[in-house]
Amino acid sequence: MSTDLEKEVIRLYDSGLSGTKISQSLKKSKKKVLMIIKSLCPKSEFDTIKKFWSKVNKNTDNGCWEWSGCKDRKGYGEFRIFGDNYQAHRIAYMLANGGIPSNISVCHKCDNPKCCNPDHLFAGTNRDNMIDLLLKGKKPDTKLNPQSVKSIREAFKNGVSRAELRQKYNISATCLNSLLRGEKWAYVK
Ligand SMILES: [Zn+2]
């Protein structure tokens, strides 16, 4: 059974309003509104996927499908889903393959960070990614080492904020998040 609030949120969403507009017009928190949309509206998933591909330019000479939206410091596309940022090429891989096993990086065969062509992507462990970079003659990220990775994870557990950690180690939010989730540097325990 849906509550009156849930019914109202879905009615407004179906009429074309964004999550932000709905939370403003109903004077409810955006988080709550987004939760309702996410859990109750089958159309929201379709809309999100449509919006994602609308930011990908498939008409390129090199066969890469290039992300035209926001990018992070390393040039990877960023896509926001219900308030959280995700790397665009990881979403493209997930949409094509149904998911990403945990502790796995999605790497580019074409070496073009903004590329979202599933045919140019492969899943590998952090180690594979490193070997791939070395084979391509590139240096892996040298800002971090196993010791600093351990320190970052421990500091975070002890309540040090993400902002402080990013500043102290001079790393991007994407890098920090995947490190904390254990996707990067998975082998450091
Ligand atoms: Zn490509």
Image: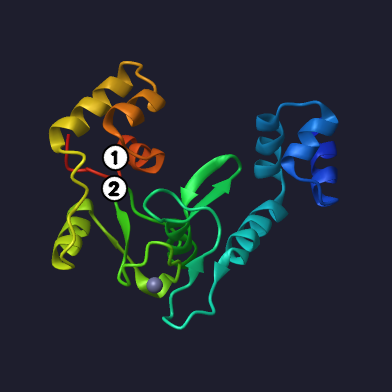
Which comes sooner in the sequence, label 1 or label 2?
2
- The correct choice, above or below, for 111 with respect to 5 in the image is below
Instruction: Determine contact: label 1, label 2, CB under 8 Å.
Output: yes
- At mark 1, the secondary structure is loop
Asked which quadrant contains residue 63, the reply is: bottom left
The residue at 22%/43% (across/down) is 185
Q: CA distance from mark 1 to mark 2?
A: 6 Å
Looking at the rendering, the quadrant in which ligand 1 lies is: bottom left
Q: How many marks?
A: 2
3 or 168, which is in the foreground? 168
Give the residue at the far top of this rendering. 158
Q: Position of residue 86 (x, y in %)?
A: 48, 48
- Give the residue pinned by disc 1: 182
Horizontally, residue 96 falls left or right of residue 41, namely: left
Q: Is residue 72 above or below residue 109?
A: above
Amino acid type assigned to the residue bearing label 2 in the image? Asn
